[in-house]
Image (tube, rainbow, N blue to C red):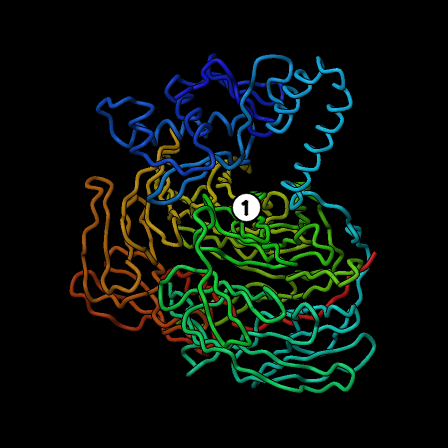
Amino acid sequence: MDRQEERGFSLGELTALPARNEIILGGRSEHVQPKVMAVFLYLAEQYPRVVSNDELLAEVWSGRVVTHSSVQKSINFLRKAIADLAGDEAYITHYSKKGYTLTKAPVFAQAGANALAPPLARPYARLRAALRAHPLGYTLAGVALFVLALMYLLLASDRIVWQRAHSVSLSQYQALTSEQGAEFGAAPHPNNRHFAYIRSEPEETVIRVAEHGSEPWPVASSEGDWQLLSWSPSGRYLAAVERVYLDERSRTPGFYGRGDGLYNLQVFELDLATGQTLDKHRLSQWQGHIRSLSWWSEDALELVASQGSGAISQRYRYHLGQQRLERVKELEFAQNPLASAIHDGRTALMNRQDGRVRVHFLNREQERFASELLATDRADISWLSDGSAVLLSSPDLPYWLVLYRDGERAVIQPPAPAGSVLQAPRYSADGQRIYASALSPRTTLRQQTPVTDTALTRGAHWNYAARWSPDAGALAYVSVRNGEHQIWLMQNGEERLLTKAPDADTVDELIWSGDGKALVFKAAGRLYRYALSSAERGVLLQEAATLTPVAEPVGGETLLVKKTIADEDNLWRVDLASAEQRQLTFGSVGAALADAQGRLYFQYIGQAGLWRITAADQEPELIEKALPANSELLHLGDEGVYFLTGGPCRESAIQFMAFSDAQVRDFLSRSQSGLETQSFHPEAGAVYRQCETPDSDILLLTD
């Protein structure tokens, strides 16, 4: 094989020079070890194929007796060198149990001035040189250029954006609904006048359709929940997903449950002129989880869903006329998809890679012609009506992103009422307006002890992630104020602002250090440490999209985290000096706590019992079989563990299990139902919030 050592290659603006073991970006460079560059080069040569560890060992190490850790170390060094130049942008992705591949198509250099010219330019350059000697050389060259240009248009037509008939400059909003309660999930109709939405009422949820300036009319009601409204291309049919609850317990999964349930897939034929439902079809009943719903054609629906408990997601198509469900062929580069959206035969498909969302653009033959990585691990997606781009939103991002098929991006800063959170934006048919759900979350944090139940905060803000300090002398929590996710400290009856999440991002997790002198939190795919004494915030780990902090033991040399791979969490120990990570569990971990000395206590999902890992032996040990499965661990004491059973918003009393005899007793009874405990300490009691559906309205955003 021609290893092309004398020629460099580029991935976008990043250039690699294997002959010099150098990586260059924007005038800066990083040197790497020869084996690290050899791995980089081999991945480039094999793009877009996924290369296994065994293949890398055979090809790069040429049969030398080394282990898979050599590959992992080289990949880690390579990622670090690239991150020092390119920041958060990922150039290498890993597929569990399969191997590695690059996220961008490499362009190899050739001799001459056009060394890094794109591949389509090279045959044209050779053709021009050959035709120059011909009597009709320039004429033929012109013809050849025309033919090549036509070939390029045919091959790249999916990437080319011919027109952008939409607005990305939005400065005003108006409320389309204003009733007390929750209206959400707007779906604009193709006629540019009507829209459908969902209203949540005390005993049912209702699908409504409205025309601007007119009263809405009900399409269907359910004692369960309506989700995922979608109009057919002609606007004749409205599809919806109905979540069915067999009993009250099935409304919320247990702690660390998968969220699987029973669904009905329904289609309504509507007469918009008379405001009537002409026909209703229940297409299929679904056991599992439905993530997205879109129309593949006027006669077929595409959904991303999982079947059965714990199954991975797949793409399915339901053909209405034939009443036939088929599974769409799995794409190797987009396994376990999160959602799909369809426009005129083109597909935007999302999955998660290295803890972040990747969007793949597929043509009508389901071949990928573009792929982009986002700076978030979750997103909502929909097509713009002109088919030029998709609109993406995420609770982690303070803006909306318009991602074009040709790779360009535009940012929308949506206007919104103070204190509101906008979700699920959808462009109107003319591309000049956006419908969105405006939620107004308000939470009061309360403290319950065996003798008192008092409010800690008032309901003017959205407060979450409350955490008692190790000695229960202070409470840290996140409060959303002025559009920022701020970390506050409550101590001795007073509260003060500590720091803010970068770029107005959501704080995904917040913990105290073992010595109580610092806070560790996750935001924007990074882990941060805030020192209380110096009031300084620093980055602990730059690449932490897949990590959730569990504990920072006394000393601050290591960090205990959960790492998510293929939707399963396991416990890892991270050396903060070297950034090396060591996996401690191999299964699927639910609740986990650690004491100040770094001893981990945890449960495997779906299994009763309590496990422990000490810093010395590193091996999990089952120390008690009596702890109920899928418990929520709250606090470790010297004599036992405090925990909850049930599930979010249907919690049990706070219970205590003694290590000495495994006896379980109620420690703190709850004064009311529908609670969510955020933190607990036996000396300070529980911090909780009431489970309430926030008010929401449908907004129309315009320029």
Residue ID at (42%, 83%): 246
Q: Quadrant of residue 100?
A: top left
For this view, does 87 lie left or right of residue 467?
A: right
Residue 302 in the image, given as x and y percentages of width and height: 54, 65
Q: Is residue 132 above or below residue 140?
A: above
For this view, does 141 lie left or right of residue 662?
A: right
Label 1 packing within 10 angstroms: few (<14), some (14-19), many (20+): some
Residue ID at (67%, 53%): 483
For this view, does 34 lie left or right of residue 479?
A: left
Residue ID at (62%, 84%): 220
Amino acid type at image mark 1: Arg
Residue 395 in the image, given as x and y percentages of width and height: 59, 55
User: If the image is split into quadrants, where does the N terminus sit?
Assistant: top left
**Number of callouts:** 1
User: If the image is split into quadrants, where does the C terminus sit?
Assistant: bottom right
For this view, does 467 lie left or right of residue 423?
A: left
Q: Is residue 63 above or below residue 271?
A: above
Depth check, front residue: 124 or 12: 124
Residue ID at (36%, 52%): 569
Report which residue position mark 1 lands on. Answer: 368
Q: Quadrant of residue 184?
A: bottom right
Determine the residue located farthest toward the front in the rendered image: 135
Residue 519 appearing in the image: no
Residue 695 in the image, given as x and y percentages of width and height: 65, 72
Residue 338 in the image, given as x and y percentages of width and height: 50, 57
Q: Quadrant of residue 256?
A: bottom left
Residue 284 appearing in the image: yes
Depth check, front residue: 333 or 486: 333
Depth check, front residue: 412 or 313: 313
Disc 1 is placed on an element classified as strand
